[in-house]
Amino acid sequence: MMKRNTVLKIINPVLGLMFLNQILTGFFHGSLSYELFELIHKGCAIIFLIIAVLHLILNWNWVKANFFIT
Ligand code: HEM
């Protein structure tokens, strides 16, 4: 089983690159073919959102400690 921190060290830069991909392909939407946009903006958006949820789950202790202080 991979450690929580090891998983974060891998997925954090991946999330950064995927976010950049959304911004760039979204911005240059007009220059891309329909098929390419479907694949690298819409397709990657779904994977991006799944990894973002995983990132939130793995950092849930941080979220609790910082936002749900009693
Ligand atoms: C976190 C960032 C983003 C995510 C998760 C995201 C996700 C998506 C998804 C899922 C679609 C497909 C919608 C559909 O076909 O029903 C879409 C479409 C689109 N997005 Fe993004 N997007 C992001 C950022 C951006 C940005 C920054 C821009 C523009 C600068 C942009 C421009 C567009 C455009 C132009 C479409 C096509 C709309 C259409 O013609 O139907 N996106 N986006």
Image (cartoon, rainbow, N blue to C red):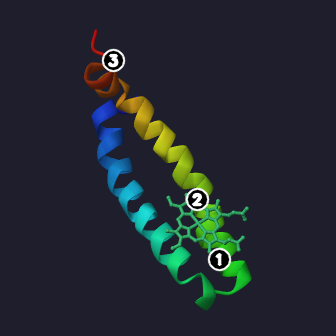
Q: Earlier in the sequence, mark 2 or mark 1?
A: 1
Q: Is residue 51 left or right of residue 17?
A: right
Could you classify mark 2 by the number of other residues whose Cα lies within 10 Å: few (under 14), some (14-19), or many (20 or more)? some
Query: Of the residues shown, which amino acid type is indicated by label 1?
Result: Phe
**What x and y, as percent, mark residue 19?**
43, 62
Mark number displayed over residue 37: 1
Looking at numbered disc 3 in the image, what kind of residue is underneath it?
A: Phe
Please name the amino acid that badge 2 sits on: Ala
Sequence-wise, the earlier of marks 3 and 1 is: 1
Is 19 situated left or right of 41 in this image? left
Q: Residue at x 31, y 24 (%)?
A: 67
Disc 3 residue lies near ligand 1 with CB under 8 A: no
Residue at numbered disc 2: 45
Q: In the image, which disc is placed on residue 21? A: none
Quadrant in the rendering for residue 20: bottom left
Q: Quadrant of the C terminus?
A: top left
- The image quadrant that residue 66 belongs to is top left
The percent position of residue 37, horizontal first and vertical second, equals: 65, 77
Q: Write the residue at 28% across / 35% down.
A: 5
Pointer 1 residue Cβ closer than 8 Å to ligand 1: yes
Counting from the top left corner in percent of width and height, residue 2 is at 37, 33
Mark earlier in primary sequence (3, 2): 2
Task: Tell me how far mark 2 sits from mark 1, CA to CA.
Answer: 11 Å
| Residue 35 in the image, given as x and y percentages of width and height | 72, 79
Callouts 3 and 2 close, C-beta under 8 Å:
no
Residue 61's place in the image compared with 24, above or below, is above
Residue 51, compared with residue 38, is above or below; it is: above
Whether residues under marks 3 and 1 lie with C-beta atoms below 8 angstroms apart, the answer is no
Residue bearing the label numbered 3? 68
Q: Is mark 2 within 8 Å of ligand 1?
A: yes
Furthest-top residue in view?
70
